[in-house]
Amino acid sequence: MDFVYAMLVLGGAVALLLWGAHMVQSGVQRAFGPRLQAFLGRHLRRRLVAFLAGIGITLLLQSSTATGLMATGFAAGALVDLVPALAVMAGANVGTALIVQVLSFDISGAAPILVLGGVVLFRRRPSGTWHDLGRVLIGLGLMLISLHQMLAVIAPYADSADLRLMLRVLTDIPALALLLAAVAAWLVHSSVAIVLLVMTLAAHGVVPLEAAIVLVLGANLGTAFNPFFEGSSATDPVARRVPAGNLLNRIVGVLAAIGLAGPIATVLTQLGLAPGPAVAAFHVLFNIAMAVVMLPLLDPLAALLRRVFPEPAPGTDPREPLYLDTAAREVPEVGLGGAAREALRLADTLEKMLVGARDALGSADRKLGESVRELDDVLDGLNQAVNAYLTAFDPEELGEEDRARRHQLLTFSMNIEQAGDVIDRALLVHNQKRIRRGALLPAEETARLKAQMDRLIANLRTAATLLMTSDPRAARLLAREKVEFRRAEREATNRHLESLRDPRSPAAEGSAIALDLLRDMKIVNSFIVAAGAYPVLDRAGELRPSRVVAGET
């Protein structure tokens, strides 16, 4: 029973370590996430600089996965070349090893001070940079407490003959030790936790140094599977290139080093290193060695990855999202960036609907309208996918800017989809009614309607631009377009009233349909303005609650 309880406590200590690392990562992302991403984007040009940037950002985020997701997002979006992105992953692996090296020192006495300082900063303000930095300090304190707890749990069993006998199989069967550590790192999504646990076991002599080295290799391998299987969408092979290159790098390195575990352990012992520090030192040296070997070979590796994971072939189901990476939600900046790219696909689809609807206005061909209606199904599917993706973010992991960005993307997506519904269920219906009745619109009326459709297309492009730039000046210009459509509606109403003087005239029915069509366009424009301009103006404090002049009641 004592042993079972000890294993539960050990598991709790590992969980506390993971949660502490999670708090550090989320705190740094909230405080500096956009700036870190911008910093990484600026330095993803040359492989050596990208490698160093990968080390630095990983040390801040306490997560190579977070750094890798940023690099993957840049590479998948064709914002940077594949070679620097792979260099970032090599740097992230070294950064993770350096984290373990720092935590290997006995600094557990600083844990209470870190937690105390973190709580003071965390409670100082309900939000802001100091609040987020408090979260970071609390996380660091929890990580140190968990390491101290792991040592306390393992120490009484260090001389247990039963435990040594059970773990001796790891020395006798290196492949089993490799597999065990790889599966453990994959399950907990952290090589840091597994390597620290192995380091603790080795420090107390529970695991021989040679077996500990094999376990470290397994942890390095296991953590590379997570971004490959979970960090890329099956519909976007390009996004698999960076995690696949990192996985291949890990596999080659592990296969080359596992046969040398014995000699490496001997050399580390001869250097006078105790088992615990020796494990940490090997972890750092292994990742540095892999970086030194792989950096010159990144060009042929990138060429291989491009052949294995080519650009997606055209003709895929347009209703399926391409950029909504589930694992990217761990890094809000990356996940929200993917959602923004998907939202732009919604805008592109609506533009196709507007172009098709404009062409249908001057035609008697009903098939034109049917092809446009099929695009509304694409809008529905993409909108549902974007909404489900964005609402799955953990609100606790989002900073103030991230929450505002998520709200902007949700608003954009839903309003674009509703604009498509108006085209499908109103504008095209009125145009079909015109075709069925054989009503002829005067050439000048058709020209006016097509001009308004062109105006809608221009406004949609402005809204899509605003989604990426959030420029208040452009938002004000787009919002004023509602005035133009109200003016056009008044003029069309006056023309229709003039035509009613002779109800039997063919112009009366044509003007009525033209007025219906223009009103539909006005509603579409309202949704476009609400999608692009209103979120920007609201954040700038320039959005009025009502157009009605305030007065006494």
Image: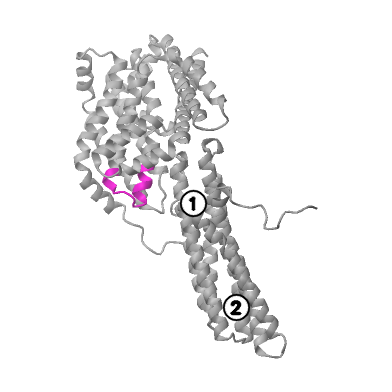
Q: Residues within 10 Å of mark 1 (few under 14, many from 20)?
A: many
Q: Amino acid at mark 1?
A: Ser
- CA gap between label 2 and label 1 equals 35 Å
Q: Residues within 10 Å of mark 2 (few under 14, many from 20)?
A: many
Q: Position of residue 414 (x, y in %)?
A: 57, 56
**Residue 504 covered by magenta stretch:** no
Q: Which residues are magenta?
A: 70-84
Identity of the residue drawn at 48% across and 55% down: 466
Identity of the residue drawn at 50% across and 55% down: 473
Q: Amino acid at mark 2?
A: Asn
Q: Work out which residue is located at the far right of the displayed protein and give it.
A: 553
Identity of the residue drawn at 54% across and 25% down: 122
Q: Position of residue 6 (x, y in %)?
A: 49, 15
Q: Is residue 515 above or below residue 145?
A: below
Q: Is residue 523 above or below residue 325?
A: below
Instruction: Determine which of the numbered discs, if any, sits on residue 307 in the image.
Output: none
**378 to the left or right of 290:** right
Name which of mark 2 and mark 1 comes first in the sequence: 2
**509 to the left or right of 414:** right
Q: Is residue 365 above or below residue 263?
A: below
- For mark 2, what is the residue? 431
Q: Position of residue 228 (x, y in %)?
A: 37, 43
